[in-house]
Image (spheres, rainbow, N blue to C red):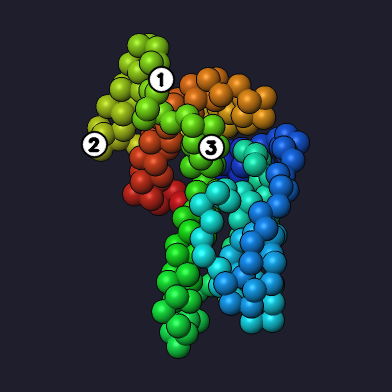
Amino acid sequence: MNVTKYKFFLIKSLLSFVLIPRLSINTTPLIEQCWQCQRKIDRIESPAYCPCEKHVVLPVRTDIDYFRLFDLSRSFEIDTKQLTRTFRNRMKFLHPDLFSNKSDIEKTYSQDQSSLFNNAYKTLLSPLARAHYLLKLENITLEDSPIQLEPDFLMRIMEINEELIEENKPFPLELAIEMRQEIDNHMKQLSIALNKMDLNKAKEILARLQYFNNINDKLIELETQHDII
């Protein structure tokens, strides 16, 4: 397969992901008073700042998950364009530079909120990080409960990694296509497992995806070296 067909394959694979209906948003209110204007506010609707004219920055609530921060369903499938729009709109009122002449408490709250929203945005923007976070919300992590994958699978991964470190070889087009197909297929399987709340299956798929993603990172480096991207 030539480079042109390979690039066409990459574009096609990105467009082939099929979305599954999202879970509903948890809208249970969290009512509290604004520390400055004293008005009652629902922190689900106003997680970062008071809806008053001054947009008073509020303290971080650790019981508001990342999806709620961006008005998104707690689901693997999210609208990343909406995520980015909401992130940028929130940061218009939260960036620490806007609070250089404010009180110490406002400076602290803005720094805390800015840090929270940056971490939340990066987590939800990445499909793998998003999947890890969804499992974490169910008190499941790969670190605390690692998956024992099949020896044949691990041997295959080891052989691929050995192939990628060999010098003076042409770019492995067929391997790259295979890995992108594996990632695409596993992403779809992960989406189905998470939407069904089959968490053990999701954890197994995510463990495999981490290996494939590591290989894909190495392939991207090789693509740069061979002037493919």
Give the residue at x 71% y 47%: 28
Counting residues from the start of the chain, the first of labels 3 and 1 encountered is 3
The local crowd at label 2, few if under 14, some if 14 to 19, many if 20 or more residues have their Cα within 10 Å, is few
Check whether the beta carbons of the residues at disc 3 and disc 2 lie within 8 A of each other.
no
| Residues at marks 3 and 2, CA–CA distance in whole angstroms | 43 Å
The local crowd at label 1, few if under 14, some if 14 to 19, many if 20 or more residues have their Cα within 10 Å, is some
- The amino acid sitting under disc 1 is Ile
Side (left or right) of 40 relative to 4: right
Give residue 80's position: percent from left, percent from top. 63, 52
Check whether the beta carbons of the residues at disc 1 and disc 2 lie within 8 A of each other.
no
Q: Nearer the viewer, mark 3 or mark 2?
A: 3
Q: Identify the mark at residue 167; answer none if there is no mark.
A: 2
Side (left or right) of 50 relative to 109: right
According to the picture, the residue beneath numbered tag 3 turns out to be 137
According to the picture, the residue beneath numbered tag 1 turns out to be 147
- The amino acid sitting under disc 3 is Leu
Counting residues from the start of the chain, the first of labels 1 and 2 encountered is 1
Q: Nearer the viewer, residue 171 or 10?
A: 10
Side (left or right) of 63 relative to 111: right
- The amino acid sitting under disc 2 is Glu
Q: Secondary structure at mark 3?
A: helix
| Residues at marks 3 and 1, CA–CA distance in whole angstroms | 18 Å
Q: Nearer the viewer, residue 108 or 79?
A: 108
Give the residue at x 58% y 65%: 48
Quadrant of residue 187 within the rendered picture: top right
One can see residue 225 in this view: yes
Q: Secondary structure at mark 2?
A: loop
Give residue 15's position: percent from left, percent from top. 67, 42
| Residues at marks 1 and 2, CA–CA distance in whole angstroms | 33 Å
The extreme bottom residue here reads 101
The local crowd at label 3, few if under 14, some if 14 to 19, many if 20 or more residues have their Cα within 10 Å, is few
